[in-house]
Amino acid sequence: MTQSVGVIGLGAMGRPMAEHLVDAGVPTSVLDVDTEVRQQVVDRGAKAAETLTEIADNDVILVVVPSDADVRTVCLGEDGLLSAPRPGSVIVISASVTPETCEEIAKVGAPHGVSVLDAALTGGVRGAENGEINLLVGGEEAVLDGIRPCLEPWTKAVHHLGPLGSGQVGKTVNNLCHWIQIAGIHEAMLLGRRLGVDPSRLRVALYDSPANSTTLHEIQEMRFTWWKKDIDNARRMAEPIGYPMPMTDQAYEQMAGITPDRINTLLIQDLDPDAEREQP
């Protein structure tokens, strides 16, 4: 029998995930504070849910909200998912949160027969829109195997990394690679320009070098929305084990001055070679 899926959070990631599920014929219920966005997904074939307890009646519930506090409210709040749990259901936390948040929710869900997986999303908005999310999962592998048909319509790869929380560790590592690389590309391209080479031409040349990467190709399309939250999460995880992260600290300082407009100016537009040379 086809499993039913509830999707909580229809933002830049959650909405296309829900739409791919609907398009694949998966019974899908959706809930979002923006009722207009919810209605647009309903018009596509989803079922509108009015409450979290209604969403909780699905076999699989995808939680795609921004923060630890949001995840706790959705799952543990007075009228949250675990206020009226469905035994045998699976809550999939697809948000960038700490492993401790995932463990807290799993502890509450276990006596009710509710399983929890943390399934971090990588691939960005374009990956979500194209149904090509790379999913990093922590939790019981048997539980993951049982819901794989609900993941296939919106993923290109699903990686089981270990116990609950491992997906969040994987996402944090991914995020650090991402932001450190952006800071490095920005710094390197500024160096190239100050030494007299057009960064837009230089970037194309680097596509054929070991420096090539998805980030190098797509950096001008990125929004740079979550760098502070991502790095703060990494720092919170590293602090208890006393792990220093000097490159992360440097990226944090650099990202404060990197914006989409600045990247566009640096890599896309044909500039006066003396323009902005004094900017860091």
Image: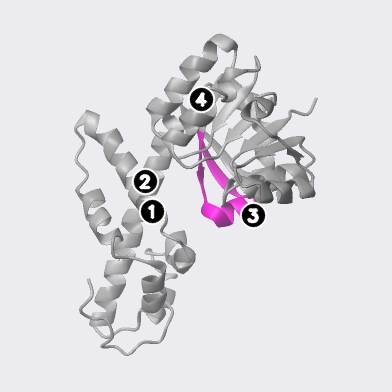
Q: Earlier in the sequence, mark 2 or mark 3?
A: 3
Foreground: 158 or 62? 62
| Callout 3–callout 4 Cβ contact below 8 Å | no
Which quarter of the picture shows residue 185?
bottom left
- The residue that label 2 is drawn on is 230
Q: How far from the left and from the top, in percent, is residue 279?
A: 23, 75
| Callout 1–callout 2 Cβ contact below 8 Å | yes
- The residue that label 4 is drawn on is 77
> In the displayed structure, would residue 29 be above or below residue 183?
above
In this rendering, position of residue 51 left or right of residue 271: right
Name the residue: 40% across, 51% down: 226
Q: Earlier in the sequence, mark 2 or mark 4?
A: 4
Q: How far apart are marks 1 and 2 (CA)?
A: 10 Å
> How dense is the environment of label 4, judged by Cα within 10 Å: few (below 14), some, or many (20 and up)?
some
- The residue that label 3 is drawn on is 130
Q: Indicate the secondary structure of the residue bearing disc 1.
A: helix
- The residue that label 1 is drawn on is 178
Q: Distance between the residues labelled 2 and 3?
A: 23 Å
Q: How far from the left and from the top, in percent, is residue 116?
A: 54, 23
Q: How far apart are marks 3 and 4 (CA)?
A: 33 Å
Q: Which of marks 4 and 1 is nearer the N terminus?
A: 4
Q: What residue type is labelled 3?
A: Asn
> How dense is the environment of label 3, judged by Cα within 10 Å: few (below 14), some, or many (20 and up)?
some
Nearer to us of marks 1 and 2 is 2
Q: Which amino acid does label 1 sit on?
A: His
> Which region shows up in magenta?
119-138
Q: Which of marks 1 and 3 is nearer the N terminus?
A: 3
Nearer to us of marks 3 and 4 is 4
